[in-house]
Image: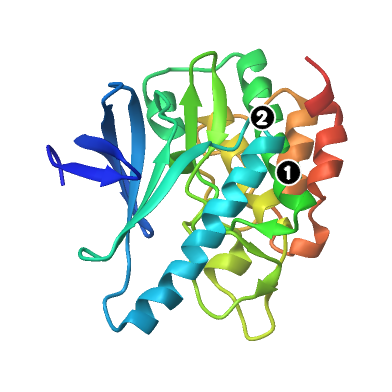
Amino acid sequence: MENRTWAIHGYYYTFDKMLGSGKFGYVYQARRYPDNKQFAVKAVPLVAGSFGDLYQNTMPILEEFRKIRELAAISYHIIYVYDFGFDSEKSLAYFVMEQGQQDLKKYLSYRALLTSADRKSKWRQLTDIAVTLNDYRIVHGDIKPQNLIVFPGMHIKLCNLGMIKQAFPKNGPSGTPPYSAPEVIIPNSTTILTTKADVWSLGAILYLITYRIAPHFGEPYYRPPSNQYPSRDPDLNDILQRTLVFNPNKRPTPSWLAKHRYTKTH
């Protein structure tokens, strides 16, 4: 799709290069004509089939578009989607989104260490995201560094809401270990996903930005890497110990995390 031009609601978008890919589609850097503004455009393949199949497949995507716009209106940390369209011939849906600088994974790869203040700033933004999702009873289930986009001013925004649902029964494995919670990765027949799954993800990302390596997927999940000492910040350690817990019922709520001493102090 690179170097090709697509029409979406009267504007023409030329795809320059691929920025990333995932389970729900591909993201390209694109330039819009005639105003020459730059965007990120997510292309989501739809399952080919009859018109009825196409209609059924587009309904969840339309709902995602509506929900993203609603969430972005109340939280600065949800990526904004400007436009949305379909290409029925190619069975593709398009999301025209604001483009950041890079995802959090790439951002961290270019930096040796984060200061305590930088780490706390990112953590507070993550808790804002979790509180917003929790207020709408939305379970993302796959919050990870690749889904967190860094914008100028070190602002972080969540993208790729392809998994968003209200609290729901879990029918099969999904997500991305170790950032997705155990109940997402290895569900059983009685698993009900709640927003506690995203609390795990926040803990895993805090672990990453603290130790510069993802947590191991084995109890106790919060223990530091074998070649590193635990953080000297007791409040940070308390967050890790409370979020990286196998049993979701023993994890705190997003609102509790937002009021934690680690979150509130600078």
- Report x, y in % for residue 132: 73, 43
Tell me where residue 35 sits by quadrant.
top left
Is residue 51 placed above or below 243 in the rendered structure? below
Measuring from the top left, give residue 115's x and y in whole percent.
59, 13
Which residue has dot 2 on it? 125
| Left or right of residue 176: residue 7 | left
Quadrant in which the C terminus appears: top right
Residue situated in front as seen by the camera: 51 or 173: 51
User: What residue appears at the point 51 percent right and 53 percent down from the top-left corner?
Assistant: 178
Left or right side of 190 for 21: left
The residue under label 1 is 132
- Give the residue displayed 51% in from the left and 45% down from the top: 144
Label for residue 56? none
User: Which mark is in front, 1 or 2?
Assistant: 1
* Residue 99 shows in this picture: yes
Q: What residue type is labelled 2?
A: Gln
Question: In this picture, is 188 found above or below 35?
Answer: below
Q: How far apart are marks 1 and 2 (CA)?
A: 11 Å
Return the disc, 1 or 2, that comes first in the chain's sequence: 2
User: Label 1 sits on what residue type?
Assistant: Thr
| Residue at image point 67% right, 77% down | 191
Task: Report x, y in % for residue 142.
Answer: 53, 54
* Secondary structure under the numbered disc 2 in the rendered image: helix
In this rendering, is residue 148 above or below 8? above
Residue 90 screen position, x and y as percent = 21, 63
Q: Which of 72 and 181 is in front in this view?
A: 72
